[in-house]
Amino acid sequence: MIEIFLKTLPFFAIIGLGYGACRSGFFPEVAAAWLTKFVFYFALSAMLFGFAASLPVAELFNVQFALAYLAGCFFVYIIATIVALARKRGLEEAAIEAQVATIGNTGFLGVPMFVTLFGAAAAGPAIMVLALDLVVFSSLIVILITVAREGRMRLALLGSLVMGLLKNPMIVSMGAGLIVAIMGWTLPVPVKEFTDILGGAATPGALFAIGASLAGKSAERISVAVWLSFLKLAVHPLAVYIAAFHIFDVDPFAAMIMVSASALPVAGNVYILAQHYGVAPQRVSAAILVSTAISVLTVTLTIAMLQG
């Protein structure tokens, strides 16, 4: 476990560096916002495109993998929703808390970490997890909040959901890479070198941006944040583990990446959604802060147990 911890420590150290730089005022908040934008629209998109373009198509369309991951996710989603409703929270807050308990930071933290730790073979499963999170759960939260507010499902909402996905650079980059893979094209050398160089900035940039964004997070409603962090860091990976290894026939290596992704801390885009809809942003902020701090140990423990 010590060996795994020492391998994951540099990733969290860069997150800590970003947190310290922004918290001290040396790296202003506006700079953190622009760094995040650069990573999101350019560096990370280039990295995802490069990985998707070089993957066997079979790795991106594995039904057993998708079913196992979604089964584990919805188990946790339902628990979080039931508990929130039992606390007399409305459907909007219950949906946000369920999103917190289910969606990990796969794009900014998971993909760079797993590829570095386990090699390029980890890219396929990690990208599959990211795609399911973006397509299924990002759409589900919008539907639930809209239904809670309007009492019905509008057909126009489906169109806006599709447009929202098409405007997401991670979806676009993975889709473009997938087209290249399906067609069997080989990227020209200048294009490949361009994506490699630009994508190389994704890992340090994303990790630093995570830390910088945490500097502005508060730890209010700590008891709820701890509960949601427990669901995200412990119950979620356990549920996905059971689904992947004992219910569905998932390749062991792909299952290991899937479970490791499930153990990641709460994704920052959940806070963006909560802030956009005005639903419990402080609660989400605290859960991101708490889960990221605790995940320094829990991610290491999860990976060590899976490898053992």
Image (cartoon, grey):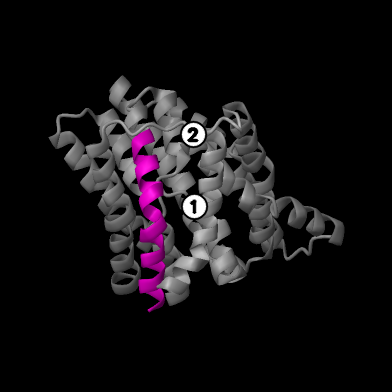
Residue 26 in the image: above or below residue 230: above
> At x 55% / y 68%, what residue is drawn?
117
Disc nearest the viewer among 1 and 2: 1
Residue 126 in the image: above or below residue 307: above
Residue sitting farthest toward the bottom: 308
Residue 127 seen from this side: no
Q: Are marks 1 and 2 in contact (CB under 8 Å)?
A: no
Q: What x and y, as percent, mark residue 297? A: 37, 59
Question: Element type at marker 1?
Answer: helix
- By secondary structure, the bulk of the magenta-drawn segment is best described as helix
In the rendered image, residue 110 lying in the magenta stretch gets the answer no
Q: What x and y, as percent, mark residue 224? A: 24, 38
Residue 11 in the image: above or below residue 150: below
Q: Earlier in the sequence, mark 1 or mark 2?
A: 1
54 vs 15, left or right, is right
Residue 267 in the image: above or below residue 48: above
Identify the residue under disc 1.
Answer: 106
The residue segment tinted magenta is 285-308
Q: What x and y, as percent, mark residue 181? A: 68, 62
189 vs 78, left or right, is right
Q: What x and y, as percent, mark residue 194? A: 80, 53
Question: Element type at marker 2?
Answer: helix
Identify the residue under disc 2.
Answer: 161
118 vs 221, left or right, is right
Residue 294 seen from this side: yes
Q: Quadrant of residue 280?
A: top left
> At x 58% / y 39%, what residue is drawn?
168
> At x 36% / y 26%, what residue is drawn?
146
